Amino acid sequence: MLPSRVTRVVVVALATLVVACGDPTKPIASSPNLPLSFSLYALTGTPSGTVNAINFFAGPRRVDPDLDFDVALDLDPNGQVVVYPIRAIAGPLGASATRIGLQQMTGTFDALREAPKTGYDTLSILTVAPGTPIAVQLVNLFSNVCVFSLNGVAMYGKFVIDSVDQPTRRLFVRTVTDPNCGFRSLVPDSIPKF
């Protein structure tokens, strides 16, 4: 049986509406990207109790048994920055709920406006020169934040060590984190569209 003319008109009108307005089921970001600037100290060669790690939503942290950090930073003898994802320090069981993927990028921190979809390494330790931007993929398997997201379970961010004060082993860091599940925009203080 062929559909009636009214049914065809309604179907065409709905199809036109979806094409004109976009996908009505597509998730919409609601929170602006979070930029932070701070300093912290190298993991080694500094007094105990100093901040030496990053939590991408809370800023500087310490490497301690609470595991309230995403990456830890250190300096090698040549002044290069060494970046440890949490699993490199805590091991797979100690950091089983958190998976932090890192990807060294080219260009500048400000030019990195969208996180890559793939290519993140969750286990390897990175050695980078100051000024090298690093894209971050954050997945917390036990967090309720993105478990039911239609847009994916990961959140994305970026960071850069702008400079290093070698005598004090102090690192000056900038981060931008997108708190919206599955969105990869890394433009500071903006609500992501993608």
Image (cartoon, grey):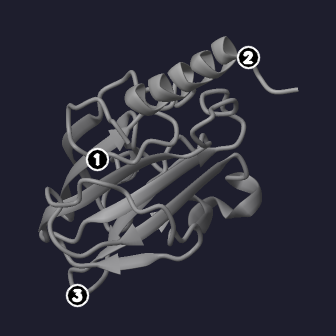
Does dot 1 land on a helix, a strand or a loop? loop
Q: How far apart are marks 2 and 3 (CA)?
A: 77 Å
Task: Give the residue type that dot 1 points to.
Answer: Leu
Q: Distance between the residues labelled 3 and 1?
A: 30 Å
Task: Give the residue type that dot 2 points to.
Answer: Ser
The answer to which of 128 and 146 lies nearer the viewer is: 146
| Residue marked by disc 3 | 78
Number of callouts: 3
| Residue 98, position as x, y percentages in the image | 63, 48
Q: Which of marks 2 and 3 is in front?
A: 2
| Residue 193, position as x, y percentages in the image | 33, 36
The answer to which of 97 and 1 lies nearer the viewer is: 1
Task: Give the residue type that dot 3 points to.
Answer: Asn
Relative to 88, 105 lies left or right: left
Quadrant assignment for the C terminus: top left
| Residue marked by disc 2 | 4
Q: Is residue 175 above or below residue 180?
A: below
